[in-house]
């Protein structure tokens, strides 16, 4: 029995036949998985919503001696000019970092009033109506024309559609589809569903315990994107001391860090906030080196490698 309790044996056995864990897992063994380059974790900095912020983070991290593997823009591609998007792409190539950009149309930008109500959090950033689906696909196509190959997706239906278009050859087969935490998914069954729909990585909700994260890893093969810290509007927690265990249990994993410097999502960081982001990334990197030296981070020149099949490694 892999779960923390022996109750409900029949249901647990039925779930196991479907490839799901029997429960949230005891944190005794590591995942044994890695990225295609044999490394176990990558550092992701989200909410990098200006080219200037991306330049500062990538340039300063190199100068200070640590690596940021992924930059994630979260304001939405259609809030940026073609020139700005092209500059994001160029920075990714220069620094060997993945550049992920968010699909622009979303509930918060739409004229629908539901998202503005007290129950609006149930909608998240999901799309409203078929025209918004059409526009979201157009947003992805615009990004592709400008060199973007990684996209943050906020709507499960859009994920399914982009996955089908990719399979049909209407979109490039090397694009990376990342499911946002704003979809509100946080259990192994949902994770497996997202993988089936075409997700290349999955950002679960931010407040999962270590046993819950371990259960997610058992259910899917795609990388997990796990928050080590978070803006105040999303809880404001800082899990620096848990970072080594998150890597051990969830590898291959993107550690999302630096957002604790911000008040919320979709903002453009100030120079002072950028410095706080860099400090938090450096602290997380230091803690991993101190407490889990066997875990390997992808180097900058390997960060652009697609997250495909991975060898099992002992960590």
Image (spheres, grey):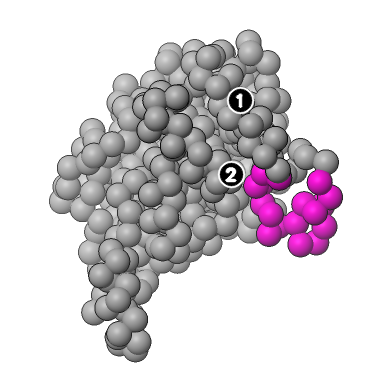
The residue depicted at 68 percent of the width and 36 percent of the height is: 132
Left or right of 150? Residue 244 is: left
Quick one: 126 or 307, which is closer to the camera? Answer: 126
Left or right of 69? Residue 249 is: left
The residue depicted at 77 percent of the width and 52 percent of the height is: 115
Task: Pinpoint residue 164: horizontal percent, then vertical percent.
Answer: 44, 37
Secondary structure mostly taken by the magenta-highlighted segment of the chain? loop
The residue depicted at 30 percent of the width and 85 percent of the height is: 10
Quick one: 62 or 4, which is closer to the camera? Answer: 4
Q: Which residues are magenta?
A: 112-128
Quick one: 150 or 169, which is closer to the camera? Answer: 169
Membership of 121 in magenta stretch: yes
Tell me the crowding category of disc 2: few under 14, some 14 to 19, or many 20 or more residues within 10 angstroms, Cα based: many
Task: Pinpoint residue 97: horizontal percent, then vertical percent.
Answer: 42, 25
Left or right of 142? Residue 112 is: right
Which quarter of the rendered picture does the N terminus lie within? bottom left
Quick one: 257 or 202, which is closer to the camera? Answer: 202
Residue 87 visible in the current orientation: yes
The residue to which callout 1 is attached is: 138
- Give the vertical position of 95 relative to 314 (above or below): above
Left or right of 10? Residue 65 is: right
- Give the vertical position of 302 relative to 4 (above or below): above
Q: Which mark is residue 108?
A: none
- Give the vertical position of 113 relative to 297 (above or below): below
Membership of 78 in magenta stretch: no
The residue to which callout 2 is attached is: 154
- Give the vertical position of 150 relative to 28 (above or below): above
Marked residue nearer the N-terminal end (2 or 1): 1
């Amino acid at each position: 029995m892999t779960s923390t309790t022996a109750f409900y044996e029949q249901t647990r056995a039925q779930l196991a036949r479907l490839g799901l864990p029997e429960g949230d897992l005891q944190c005794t063994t590591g995942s044994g998985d890695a990225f295609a380059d044999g490394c176990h974790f990558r550092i992701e900095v989200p909410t990098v919503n200006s080219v200037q912020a991306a330049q500062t983070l990538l340039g300063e991290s190199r100068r200070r001696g640590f690596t940021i593997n992924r930059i994630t823009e979260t304001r939405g591609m259609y809030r940026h000019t073609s020139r700005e998007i092209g500059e994001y792409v160029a920075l990714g190539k220069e620094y060997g970092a993945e550049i992920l950009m968010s699909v622009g149309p979303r509930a918060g930008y739409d004229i629908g009033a539901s998202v503005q109500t007290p129950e609006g959090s149930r909608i998240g950033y999901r799309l409203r109506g078929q025209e918004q689906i059409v526009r979201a696909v157009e947003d992805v196509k615009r990004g592709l024309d400008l060199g973007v190959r990684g996209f943050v997706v906020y709507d499960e239906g859009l994920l399914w559609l982009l996955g089908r278009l990719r399979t049909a050859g209407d979109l490039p087969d090397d694009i990376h589809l990342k499911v946002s935490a704003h979809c509100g998914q946080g259990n192994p069954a949902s994770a497996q569903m997202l993988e089936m729909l075409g997700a290349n990585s999955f950002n679960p909700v931010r407040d999962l315990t270590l046993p819950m994260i371990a259960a997610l890893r058992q259910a899917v093969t795609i990388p997990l994107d796990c928050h080590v810290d978070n803006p105040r509007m999303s809880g404001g927690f800082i899990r620096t001391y848990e970072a080594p265990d998150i890597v051990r249990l969830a590898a291959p994993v993107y550690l999302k860090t630096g957002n604790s410097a911000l008040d919320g999502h979709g903002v453009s960081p100030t120079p002072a906030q950028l410095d706080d982001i860099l400090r938090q990334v450096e602290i997380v990197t230091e803690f991993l080196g101190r407490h889990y030296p066997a875990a390997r981070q992808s180097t900058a020149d390997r960060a652009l490698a697609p997250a495909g099949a991975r060898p099992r490694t002992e960590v």
